Amino acid sequence: MWTWFHKFASPPHAYRLLGTLAPWFGWPALALILLAAWWGLVEAPADYQQGDAFRILYVHAPSAWMSMFTYVVMAVAAAIGLIWRIKLAHAAAAAAAPIGASFTFLALATGSIWGKPMWGTWWVWDARLTSELILLFLYLGYMALRSSFDDPQRADRASAVLAIVGVINVPIIHYSVEWWTTLHQPASVTKFDRPSIDISMLIPLFIMIAGFQFYFGWAICRRLRGEILRRERNATWLKEAS
Amino acid sequence: MRRAATLHAARLVFRRDLTLAWRRWDEVAQPLIFYAVVTTLFPLATTPDLAQLRTISGGVVWVAALLSSLLALESLFRSDVEDGTMEQWVLSGQPVGWLLLAKVAAHWVLTGLPLVVMSPIVGTALGLPFDAWGTLIVSLLLGTATLSILGGIGAALTVGVRRGSVLLSLLVLPLAMPLLIFGSRAVGMAMDGDSPAGPLQLLAAIFFLVLSLGPLAMSAAIRISVES
């Protein structure tokens, strides 16, 4: 098993494998996202309270989900890289961070746009939005730490420690923020407490989440290939291949 | 036997850091002055009215305490890494986590503890009622201690990085946000006459979690910084 593992983790092999894998993620992602967009934006009934404004949910909820999913992926990759000293895992963590930060930003932006018709303001210190904002800070800190080292190995390992510390903290941050808002917020926001969502609205949401997952797979394949190219730019196998 | 040696080594590190700080006490005093200056900014920026200041006093004291203890953290490990002391610690065979924890403890005694002692005075100047003193002190004791360990992890990661202090704040402040939430809430609840036991216990829980896992992260981080 270990020989297989090391073969997989060798840059030339991984580079080729990721190249073949990418379309297997990319095309399903496109198909699923288009299907879910059509279903969610056209087919699904309008919400009886929020009207058509709720439809931003189909972008907001999947991005919020993906922002946390990506952080966990990043931390697991970082831990694998740190424990077994696999450079490819570090490269994967490095490739995942900007994707996660983008998802987080998308979730924040759509949440804010959604807040305008629902709450009447662009920003409310709502528990989910606030912990999403802190998550964005964590991503930015991770990327800032990574970019501040000249030595790529040290950058890999130092940022891996940070990612692991961060992933232990994410639940603490989440629950503390939740507790903080339940104590502070006036009752007017309870209108946001959605009644259990109807199944006809839920199916496109799940398709969209699946589409986002596939998109993430595609994006990480592409970014990881780029990361491998950047790290191996002086390697002989690259010169032979080109 | 080995454990006794480790504790002895940790005690030596602790005493050494206190002695070093004593000889350069003006550097130790700087975060405290910063603390006083920052808390002065808030009445100037908002209002001199004590009744209004009182509503934000707990939060202001907490934010100022977080920022000032971060200020001192940047140089925590730097001189030891630069002059090779840290390398010897890593090579010494003693568990590095214990030595680093002793160092962080010394740092906390020098910056965290004075901040805690100062905070009731600063809080009173902002209209914090006398009843909330106890809660403020307990919450800051737990909070600054936790922050010292969290900051120790950050400082170990950023040793030798250009413009490390900004980066350190960027790394540590998001992780410290739960402390701020629970700490300032505890003070707020005490001011309203409620029992602040809940948030204080949560603060204590976070402190013990960080105390148990923090040294592992610190020693991993310092090994990375020293080895490469």
Image: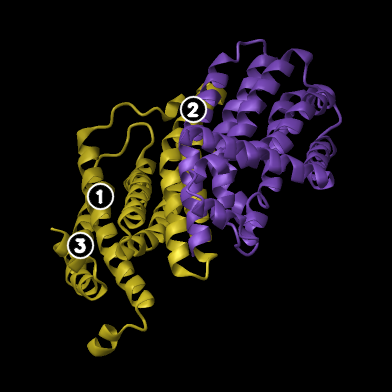
Please tell me whether mark 1 sits on a helix, a strand or a loop.
Answer: helix
Residue nearest the observer in this picture, B9 or A38: B9
B219 lies above or below A32: above
Q: Which residue occupies 29% across, 86% down?
A: A236
Q: The chain coloured purple carries which letter?
A: B
Q: Which residue is mark 3?
A: A25
Q: Position of residue B87 (x, y in %)?
A: 55, 57
Q: Position of residue A41 (x, y in %)?
A: 28, 49
The amino acid at mark 1 is Met
From the image, state whether disc 1 or disc 2 is nearer to you: 1
Q: Are marks 1 and 2 in contact (CB under 8 Å)?
A: no
Specify the quadrant that holds the C terminus of chain A. Answer: bottom left
Residue B30 is drawn in which quadrant?
Answer: top right
Chain at tag 2:
A
Mark toward the start of the polypeptide (3 vs 1): 3
Q: The chain coloured yellow carries which letter?
A: A
Q: Which residue is mark 2?
A: A189
The amino acid at mark 2 is Val
Left or right for A219, reference A176: left
Specify the quadrant that holds the N terminus of chain A. Answer: bottom left
Q: Which residue occupies 50% across, 40% down?
A: B215
Disc sitting over residue A208 in the figure: 1
The amino acid at mark 3 is Phe
Badge 2: few (under 14), some or many (20 or more) residues near its Cα, within 10 Å? Answer: few
